[in-house]
Image (tube, rainbow, N blue to C red):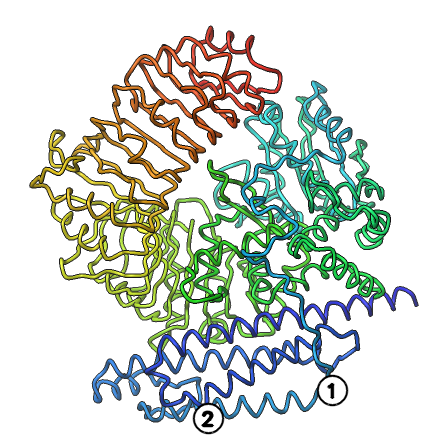
Amino acid sequence: MQNTKSKVTREREREREREMAVQAVVSVVIQKLSDLVKERSEIFESVRDEVKKVMEELGEMQRILNNAEHQEQSNRVLTNSVVQFLGKVYSLGDAIESFALTETRLKKMGFVKKHIFVMANEFKLCREVPDALDCSENVRGLKSKMKGFSKEIQEWKGKIPSLAPAPLQDSHTMRLHEQTWQESDAYYARKREDTIFKKDVQKLLKQITSDSKPLQIISVFGEIGIGKSAHVKTIYNKQEVKNKFDKCRALLAVYKNWSVRDLILAILRQMTSMKGLEKLKDEVLRGRLHGFLKGQKYLIVINDITSLDLLEKLRGALPDVYNGSRVVITTPDEEAASFADAPSRYHFKPVDMDDGLKIFIKKVWGIKGYPFSDEIEDLKNKIAESCKGTPLRISLLAGLLSTRKAIYEDCLRVFEQLDFATKSPSFDILAFCYNDLPLHLKPCFLYLGLFRKGFEIPVRRLFRLWLAEGFVKPSEEGIILEDIVEGYLEELVNRNMVEITKKRSDESPKKCRMIVVLHDIFLPRAVEIGLFHLHQKSDAAEEPRIRVRRLVEYTNIKGYLASKAFSQNLQSYISFNGRKKDMPAKEVGIFLERTIGARGFGLLKVLDLEGVYQPKLPDNLGNLFHLRYLGLRWTFLDTLPASLGGLLYLETLDIKHTHITTLPSSIWNMKHLRHLCLNGSRLDISAKSRGPSQIQILWGLFVDEKNARNIGLTLSRMTNLRKLDLTRRSSSTVATTITTTGTSHSSSYEEIASRIQSLSSLQSLRLRSKDKMGRPSELIVKPFSNLKNLSQLYLLGHLRKPLPWYQIPPGLKVLTLSVSQLENDPMPTLSQLSSLMVLRLLASSYVGEEMHCPENGFPALRVLKLWKLEHLKIFTVHEGTMQKLHTLEIRCCEKLEELPVTLLQIEGFDNLILTDMPSPFVSTIRNKKEKHTKIMEIKE
């Protein structure tokens, strides 16, 4: 009886969470349709009233769902109908977008051509309009759809009981002008957290790296959210572990529905380059893994395994080698942890009340401590009751509180909500923290689930996908969308629902992922409400409950169902089909042609093929009029379809790491283009072309003498440009092209240098100069002092004169110089840059013998890299200099005699990387360094 009751309460909780997820999706649909109507106002003039009415009714539906979210009453009529009704909402969006596309095409065609097009393709708007279609018929068709949808909304509202008004929500979205519990720079800070299970971690590390020869299978057991996988991964990434298992190791996370075949495939893909594995039978796969591992000293870490049967089946594929191999499993399942062949067991138990309180206080208030000492015991009890001793739950609750204003009343309000929520038998702090998310963040968070569990998502990719999907809502006039989307990720990180897994050298986020435990919980919910559909097996024939809008491909798309319901309404296609780079992905073209179909267009907004080897793109790609995102990075494509210029609403075009070297001039007709990432591509452009005025990123552009002048003119119109990367090629190795003086040169490159000076929004700039043989050539730049927002600067090419410090923007954080051939010591100048965090002096950037860092210089420097400074002998650092330095990398500076003691004694100097440095130099440094400084010696 108790189990039945528990099951019912869990199901009820799932239903309520489904309501809230649907509410977020409806919000996105409203936002996307509002943007479309505003963007294409002339097309919607004849149906404006009908569309407006439906939008208002959608808003009312959203309010009803919001009311339901805040009530405990069991409302099965609502919960059971909400997902089905979502399909109607999606269909409405399809109807409006199809209308816009049809109007656009019909207006571009002459009257006769229009009817020929309609008759030839047997086109049917929304599959319900007659063949003889004209503009007026198109309008009537949409109006009919609107009326039908309004009627369905009224019927839906009539079936549900009245709900009390929703309580006013707290303003729990972080605002820039309000002080919150969490420090404002927490997003970028270097975080060091002491491990909770320190003794167990040290013991496990010692066992993995011991000299014991027999194969050891080790289990790490603990409930979900205890931190076992994170600790094991930390061990896996330690240098001593990498050194011991340098040739054969794998780290993977298991999905709940995995078979032993899936597990073996995952291991083989990480450890080997074997081809055609998918075609092999199970017995052959086991033999392949057993045969490969038999001659190896291997380390396999398998996280989140929950099946004892799966472990027993895998064991037969693991050879009993006598060479120190190890297998580590983490599991929340006690039966799996008791696996007979894993005699070594570690049990990570829930933390006690005092440790839980310490974790909570540290995450919310840091070193300041808890500001309300009178309530400390009450706080301890509330944390213990709601978080049950698991660090993840404590972390999530701390993240939730960190978004409130730093006043006691807000803190108290959170705990009052907790007191109420914990009375429910199905209460879970994980769901509580998700429900607390602002409406606009819920689809953004769920969207992270489409990436594989544990996959480290490039932040630039995530930001641009969120933008293209319509998840980002403009907050106020004049605020750049890219700033808003950065704030979205920042709040999810501060709430401890998303983690930054890799940072750039200036501490800004580079890669992120959903917390792994949350991935298992929220992925099924995102799929259930139709946010996206996963195509995971080539032989899969699953029929989704809601027509597919976003298709995520993990395997060959060839096996995907060919039904119109699976393609014609598709709005996003994201592929993770990273098979070996041997066969072009021709099936992609076939699938896209099916998506465009007989209608002659498709509703696709996102086409992300990053990492798919040479996908075949259809010739009529330009018919995807609504396409916002075209991601082709790492596809190694040679060309793009000529119809590319038809993508007038494209916002992101990414062809970095391809073989595409030229693009048509029609690309400049894409007025909505915001991110253009090239691979050293040349663009033809006329002097009259204005270019996309909204462009934020122009990266990888190749400039020669033929297009330099027109590129310069176009740059002057790109007033919103934030990131710019230009590589120019000179016709000779001698000609001066960009000058620091006012002298006018005949070269057109002079104009580009002047235009760059006026790009006041520029944040990142990379300039490279090469001769016709690809060798670095002379690059003499103009002062950058006008670029107040510039934070990253990369210069490759010969600099005759270094810029005085006052000609470099004071806010510069990262500076890279390569082949600059500076004869004078640059350190006295650069040391005065108060914001400089990273300095890279690469090959031949300085050709002198001595380098001196003056007293109290480089106040913000964290990372210093000295590479291939072949003449450098003496490097001195005076007192008080580089006091924040934590990493120094020296590579191939063979004449360097020693490092100064003042540098080695810096308190936070943790990492010294020495690559191809003389052995006597390394030995001397080892004897002088402080204990906390770790030396990594690399021979290449």
Is residue 301 visible to the viewer in this orientation of the structure? yes
Q: CA distance from mark 1 to mark 2?
A: 28 Å
Dot 1: within a 10 Å radius of its alpha carbon, few (fewer than 14), some, or many (20 or more) residues?
Answer: few
In this picture, residue 769 sits left or right of residue 887: left
In this picture, residue 342 sits left or right of residue 27: right
Residue type of the residue flagged with mark 2: Ser
Tag in front: 1 or 2: 1
Quarter of the view holding residue 219: top right
Q: Which of 702/170 is in front?
A: 170
The location of residue 101, given as percent across then percent down, is 35, 78
Location of mark 1 (residue): 161
Residue at position x 55%, y 73% in the image: 27
Quarter of the view holding residue 693: bottom left
Residue at position x 26%, y 88% in the image: 115
The location of residue 822, given as percent across then percent down, is 26, 23
The location of residue 327, given as percent across then percent down, is 69, 33
Location of mark 2 (residue): 144
Residue at position x 87%, y 68% in the image: 4
